[in-house]
Amino acid sequence: MGPAAVSRASAATTATAGVPRALWAHHPESAARLAPWVRFARVTAVAASNLSRLLRRGDGGVIGGTVALRMAPDILTRLGRGRVLACVSGTNGKTTATRLSAMALGTRLPVISNSSGANLTAGLVTTLCRHRTGRAVLEVDEMYLAGVVRSVQPRVVVLLNLSRDQLDRTAEPHRIAASWRAALCDARSCIVVANCDDPRVTWAAAGAANVVWVSAGQSWTGDSYVCPACGDVLHRGIAGTHVTWHCPRCGLARPDPDAALTGRRLTLRGVGSWRVTLSLPGRANRANAAMAAVAAHVLGVPVHEALSSMRDIDAVEGRYGVHTIDGVACRLILAKNPAGWAETIDLVGENDRPLVLAVNARPVDGLDTSWLYDVPFERLAGRRLWVTGAAAVDLSLRLSYGRVPHRLVRDVSAAVRDWSTHRAIPAPPEGAAPVDVTPAGCIDVIADYSNFRQLRSHPQITGRPSTDRTAISPRTIAVRSTSVARGPRPGRAL
C-alpha cells in the first residue's frame, strides 16, 4: 500500500477530529426490540450468570453468554442492533482504556461495559444480555475484533497497539492486523480511533473510511521492525518531539496525527490542548487516557470533561491496586508479554521500591517462556529483586544471563517475609495497619495473569516459610541450573 491510501484515510477524518460527532447523545435509551426466542435466550443467560455468582463459581461474566450462544448463535448481532457501541482492542492496555472510555462517555448518559475483562464473544453477550441500555463500551480481544465488528457494527473502534502475545495459542500479529484491516474496510459507517505510532495498527486502520489518527506513542518496537504491507525494513526518525516511521519500498508511512500526546499534554488539532492528569501511573496509562479522550470527543463528549472523569481512577480490575500480604502493602502490576513487561519496567523505574517478579507460564499465560529473553530485564540491575512462580527457574536463568542479582523464593509471601526480615521490622499484630517497610510504603509485585489473578483473589495468602535465602548471581546460578539443562516442560511447577 502506498502513501496515497494513508493520506486519503487521514483526509477523510480531519473534520471528524475537529468537530464532535454527537452520536452518544442522540440515541434512544434502550436497545432494539428482540424476537421472542432471543428474549428467552437473554433471560436464560442472565439467570445462568446470576446462578454462577450465587454459587460463587465466578462472576458469571462468561457462562451467561455461553448459554445464550447455544440457544441463539446470532444473538450478538441481534443484541447489538439499535445500540451505539464503542469497541476497544489491542494487545496491551485494553482493559484500562475501556474503563477510562466508559467513565468519559458516562459523564453525559448511562453506559454499560464488560468491566470484568470478559472480552471474548461469550463475555460480550453476557454484558449486553444483563443490561438493555442503548450505549456500551466493550473491551474486545484482538483475535475476536474482526468478527465482533462484523456482528455489531460499532460506531467507534479504538485500536491501541499490536504486538506478540502467547504465540503458542494465538495468531501472529500480522495475521491479526490483516483480519482487522479486512473487517474495517467493510465497516463504512464506523469511525476508527487508531494509534498512528504503531505501524501494524496504522496499516490495519488505513483502509477504513473514517480514521482519527492519534499519536499515543510506541515504546516497544520489537514487533514492528518490518513494513506490514510489503515486509521491507522500516526506517525510523524524529520529527519534533515524536518518532516517525516509513517504508522506503512501498511508501507506507506514519500519518500526520489529528491528536497527539506529548509528555503529559494532549493536543487535538483545531480544537485545543489539555493536560493529562491521572492517578494511574506511567506513560502507557497516559496513552490509554489520550485514546479514550479522543474516542469520547468523537462521540460528542468534550475532551476536558472526558479527562476530568478519569482523574481519580487509581486502579482498574486490580491493576495497580494495593493489597496487604503478610502485613506489607504490595502494589499489583499485570505484565503478560514482552511489550507489557518493557512498559512495566519503565514504570517501576520511576521509584526504588523492592520488586517481586512472578511468572507461571500456565496455559492462560502462554506456555512458551522464550519471550523472557526479549524483555530488557537488565534495567533492573541494582534493584532489590525476588523471583517466584512455576517458571521461576526460567526467569532466574534469564536474569542471571543479564547479570541481574536476585533471590529465588517459593512465593510472594516468602519474598515479603524475606524483605521484612532483612529490614528487621517485626510483623504487625493481626488486624493492625500494614508495616511501612519502604520509603514509599509499598513493594511492587509484577505478575503474569495466573499469578495476578490468584494474588488479587487471595491477597492475604501465606505460603510456607522459604528455606531459600541464596542470592542468585551469575556465579551461583550454575549450582541451580541442572534442572534447566534437562529442559523441564514449559508451564510445569518446579
Image (cartoon, helix red, strand yellow):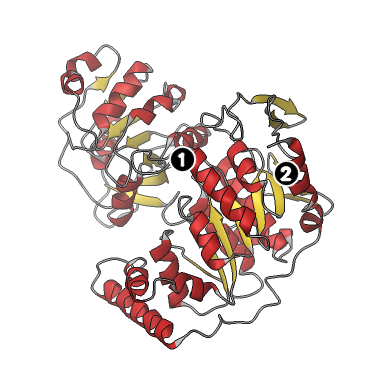
Residue 373, by quadrant, is top left
Q: What label does residue 419 carry, if any?
A: none
Query: In the rendered view of the protein, which quadrant contains the C terminus?
Result: top left
Residue at 56%, 75% in the rendered image: 81
Q: Position of residue 421 (x, y in %)?
A: 25, 33
Mark 1 secondary-structure assignment: loop
CA distance for labels 2 and 1: 32 Å
Q: Residues within 10 Å of mark 2 (few under 14, many from 20)?
A: many
Query: In the rendered view of the protein, which quadrant contains the N terminus?
Result: top right
Q: Position of residue 374 (x, y in %)?
A: 43, 26
Please state which amino acid type lies under the numbered disc 1.
Ala
| Camera-side residue of 178 and 257 | 178
Residue at 29%, 72% in the rendered image: 53
Residue 125, by quadrant, is bottom left
Query: Mark 2 vs mark 1: which is more N-terminal?
Result: 2
Residue at 39%, 71% in the rendered image: 73
Label 2 or label 1, whichever lies nearer to me, is: 2
Residue annotated with mark 2: 260
Residue 237, by quadrant, is top right
User: Seen in the image, is 5 located left or right of residue 334?
Assistant: right
Q: Position of residue 28 (x, y in %)?
A: 64, 82
Please state which amino acid type lies under the numbered disc 2.
Ala
